[in-house]
Amino acid sequence: MISNPVEANRCLHSAPPDDPPCVRQQNAEIASAESLEGFYPVSMYSIVQCETDGSYYPKQCDVRSRECWCVDEAGMQITYH
């Protein structure tokens, strides 16, 4: 049994290699934020948002700056000229 809450949370956020890229990126960002949790709470890190089907949510935001941007199917920022 895992008694450490961070370790237990990491188990919940581990992604099989066949998960969509958004889910793998999200899990990596959560793990990174958790490893730095003593510096800032996890909720203060911008973590990519995924749709329920694992695709990238079209609008991504930075929680600290409150800036948002649109992304394409690959999660890349869409620039408008």
Image (cartoon, helix red, strand yellow):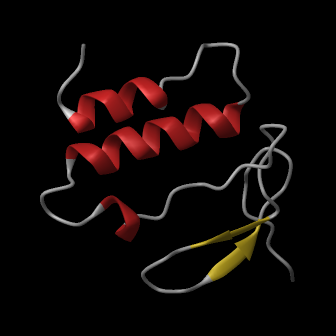
**Image quadrant for the C terminus?**
bottom right
Question: Residue 67 in the image: x percent, y percent?
Answer: 59, 84
Question: Residue 57 in the image: x percent, y percent?
Answer: 78, 57
Is residue 77 shown left or right of residue 31? right
Task: Say which residue appears at 42% left-offset and 81% top-offset.
Answer: 64
Q: Name the one closer to the observer, 25 or 13.
A: 13
68 up-or-down from 10: above or below: below
65 up-or-down from 13: above or below: below
72 up-or-down from 12: above or below: below
Is residue 35 shown left or right of residue 42? left
Residue located farthest toward the left when viewing the structure as drawn:
38
**Image quadrant for the N terminus?**
top left
Question: Residue 53 in the image: x percent, y percent?
Answer: 84, 38
1 up-or-down from 38: above or below: above
Is residue 44 shown left or right of residue 23? left
Task: Say which residue appears at 69% left-offset and 32% top-offset.
Answer: 21
Is residue 75 shown left or right of residue 4? right
Q: Please identify the quarter of the rendering in which residue 29 is found.
A: top left
Task: Say which residue appears at 73% left-offset and 50% top-offset.
Answer: 75
